[in-house]
Image: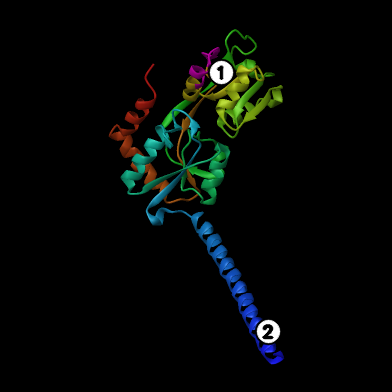
Amino acid sequence: MKKFLALFLAAVLVCSTAVMFAGCGGKTESSSAASDSKTSDSKSSESTAAKGELHMATNAAFEPYEYQEGGKVVGIDAELAQALCDKLGYTLVIDDMEFDAIITAVSSGKADFGMAGMTVTDERKKSVDFTDSYTTAIQAIIVNEGETKVAKADDLKGATVGVQLGTTGDIYVSDMEKDGTKVERFSKGADAVLALTQKKVDAVVIDNEPAKKFVEQNKGTKILDEPFENEDYAICLKKGSELTEQFNKALAELKADGTVKKIIDKYIKAS
């Protein structure tokens, strides 16, 4: 009986050891899978042009240039990007993100290019390259009807002004902080306009076309007749990207055949 018990215990010990090593083996496999996942993430941060697709970084809260409709990103920039990719033979993938993350995504290679109603500025040129401009825009000033504190652009000095974080409106108004202007920054333009309607800010500075949409959606607000700034929109790409030349060539062809104008006219009706 003792002999039988000893044999039984020995068998149990062998089985337990086997299970223990099997468990260790499972952990090693899991660790390897995690390593493969990290490698994959690293590769995904590189340009995907070689795979036949291009990732566009945008902020889909900027109607009519880019916004969400039916679960997809639509608008001027989305359609123009599609036309460019079709002409160049790439599949377009749109990555929606915060506006102030776009240049970082492009400069780091996580996105191949950025389109988000983006103005060409000397400061941005330090981080990315830009294509030729595809349209011009105006920085507008939104105020509450009946309010007289901000009646023209110069009145922004000393006022509390709402802007969307990282936009040119943010850049331009920030230059006025030395004149006593207080800048309130919001992740979305809609949030800045909401703060205006709640009288938490005196005015909002934002691109003219989105400004029109915001005023339509928020009764009691208006756009001042005097524009704040004129600017050029262009596509941003990683410094030294070979895609810049390709985009410029394709963009010139799309301008020449009327495609660019057709896309813009679809979303922006002539006054």
Which mark is in front, 2 or 1?
Answer: 2
Residue 184 location in percent, x, y? Answer: 66, 27
Three-letter amino acid code at disc 1?
Ile
Residue at screen point 62% across, 9% down: 147
**Nearer to us in this view, 68 or 117:** 68
The alpha-carbon separation of the residues under discs 2 and 1 comes to 83 Å
Left or right, 164 with reference to 242: right
On whether residue 224 falls in the magenta region, the answer is yes
Q: Earlier in the sequence, mark 2 or mark 1?
A: 2
Task: Decide if residue 134 is in sight here.
Answer: no
What kind of element bears circle 1?
strand
**Residue under pointer 2:** 9
**Nearer to us in this view, 154 or 50:** 50
Would you identify the image quadrant in which residue 80 lies?
Answer: top left
**Residue under pointer 1:** 142
Pointer 1 local density, CA inside 10 Å: few below 14, some 14–19, many at least 20: many
Three-letter amino acid code at disc 2?
Leu
Most extreme residue toward the top is 146
Reply above or below: 191 against 244.
above
What kind of element bears circle 2?
helix
Reply above or below: 256 against 104.
above
Q: Which residues are magenta?
A: 214-226
Most extreme residue toward the bottom is 3
**Nearer to us in this view, 44 or 100:** 44
Residue 56 location in percent, x, y? Answer: 45, 44
Residue at screen point 55% across, 12% down: 220
On whether residue 210 falls in the magenta region, the answer is no
Pointer 2 local density, CA inside 10 Å: few below 14, some 14–19, many at least 20: few
Residue at screen point 55% across, 26% down: 190
